[in-house]
Image (cartoon, rainbow, N blue to C red):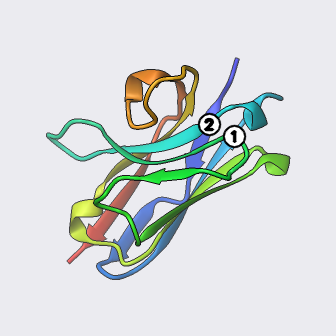
Amino acid sequence: QVQLVESGGGLVQAGGSLRLSCAASGRTFSSYAMGWFRQAPGKEREFVAAINWSGGSRYYADSVKGRFTISRDNAKNTMYLQMNSLKPEDTAVYYCARRGAMGAMINGNEYDYWGQGTQVTVSS
């Protein structure tokens, strides 16, 4: 059983920064690609960023490209999302997930384990 636990969310002013962490249980973390998704109130879940098993390939939604950076530390079984230049439209619950299938990185249906989410609120 894999458990994913997000942390690092909070309230920040526009233009500020936050760093999210996703701690994974189990021995297989380094074998899987991982991703971040978010869901704002009244909106569908959307892809934010993904990273392959080694960290050598990274993918971003256009809306966060240049502002967010995804990374991972396989020795610590942890993935990160550094969020800079935050905007009010970044307000959402952020989820980390493990990509269990081989489909498109942006497709949430390709992810088999999800964390409980952490709230990020950006005030204007």
Count the marks: 2
Can you give x and y, in whole percent of width and height, for residue 30 in the image? 77, 37
**Circle 1 residues within 10 Å: few <14, some 14–19, many ≥20:** some
Can you give x and y, in whole percent of width and height, for residue 61 in the image? 35, 53
**Mark 1: secondary structure:** loop
- Amino acid of disc 2: Ala
Left or right: residue 26 compared with residue 6 = right
Instruction: Find residue 86 and report its image quarter.
Output: bottom left
In the displayed structure, 46 sits above or below 101; it is below
Marks 2/1 in contact by CB < 8 Å: the verdict is yes
Residue found at x 29% / y 79%? 14
| Between 43 and 111, the one nearer to me in the picture | 111
Left or right: residue 72 compared with residue 26 = left
Can you give x and y, in whole percent of width and height, for residue 23 in the image? 68, 44
Residue found at x 68% / y 24%? 2
From the image, tell me which residue sits under label 1: 53
| Between 52 and 86, the one nearer to me in the picture | 52
Question: What label sits on residue 33 in the rendered view?
Answer: 2
In the displayed structure, 86 sits above or below 92; it is below
Residue found at x 39% / y 80%? 16
- Reading the chain from its start, which is encountered first: label 2 or label 1? 2
Can you give x and y, in whole percent of width and height, for residue 65 in the image? 38, 64
Q: What distance separates the C-alpha of mark 2 from that of mark 1?
A: 5 Å
Instruction: Find residue 34 and report its image quarter.
Output: top right
**Mark 2: secondary structure:** loop
Question: What label sits on residue 64 in the rendered view?
Answer: none
Report the quarter where the N terminus lies: top right
- Amino acid of disc 1: Trp
Residue found at x 78% / y 28%? 28
Q: Determine if residue 34 is in view.
A: yes
Report the quarter where the C terminus lies: bottom left
